[in-house]
Image (cartoon, grey):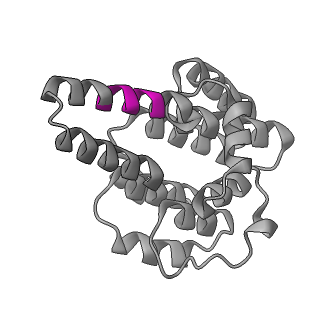
Amino acid sequence: MIWFLLLVFVFALVMGYFQVPIGIMYGILAVMIIFFLIRNPLVFGKDPEKMLAYLKKSKAAHLQFLFHFLQGNLSCLGEYPLEKSATKLGIDALRERKEYGKAKVLLSKMSGHKTKWYALSDIAIQEEDTESFKQYKEKINDTFLLNMLEVDQAVFDGKRKEAVALLENMIPKLRGYKLLTAVQVRKQILEGKI
């Protein structure tokens, strides 16, 4: 990503030096952005296998972390410095390890973002705290996260077939990270890992 931004900056400098008309500059910038979005399967991708291959060969630490996390391979994650940063992946890893106290501490440091409310809702499901679950769920506007909460609730209640059916209905409408997440959750439910 940083190379892309540096390339855009260098192009802007060169075009400014040669006094290229602004319309052409915007056109070239638009083509570069579209090329980047098409080339990166995690943004609009529809093929989960291609997205997983992209994550697997990626050299970025957060993408490798995401790959191992989505595969359910927590032993490969090692002791990721979770307590130092309140990142979505770190909080997800703590929730996966059932360290809800540490996750709540990290979540309290986050601003009121939909990720925070989703994580707190999921923790409330696991702790069987229906009042907190309803309170946090009301703050979420994202339909994908609301549907994933329904899936989490169905899995927690032992209704795995209903959870898989919900995911099957969601998958054709999703792209990118959301699609990859839904496919991996469905896979883990079918394998009995969740």
Near-viewer residue (17 or 137): 17
Up-down relation of residue 56 to residue 45 (above or below): below
Which secondary structure type mostly characterizes the magenta part of the structure?
A: helix
**Residue under the point 76% across and 64% down:** 74
Quadrant housing residue 168: top right
Quadrant housing residue 49: top right
Question: As drawn, is 189 to the left or to the right of 108?
Answer: right
Q: Position of residue 139 (x, y in %)?
A: 30, 48
User: Does the stretch in magenta take in 162?
Assistant: no
Near-viewer residue (89 or 117): 89
**Residue under the point 53% across and 66% down:** 91
**Residue under the point 52% across and 19% down:** 173
Question: As drawn, is 178 to the left or to the right of 165?
Answer: left
Outermost residue on the front side: it is 18
Residue 129, visible in the rendered structure: no
User: Does the stretch in magenta take in 31?
Assistant: yes
Near-viewer residue (4 or 189): 4
Magenta part of the chain = 29-36
Question: As drawn, is 83 to the left or to the right of 158?
Answer: left
Q: Position of residue 83 (x, y in %)?
A: 52, 81
Q: Position of residue 119 (x, y in %)?
A: 48, 57
Question: As drawn, is 34 to the left or to the right of 172?
Answer: left
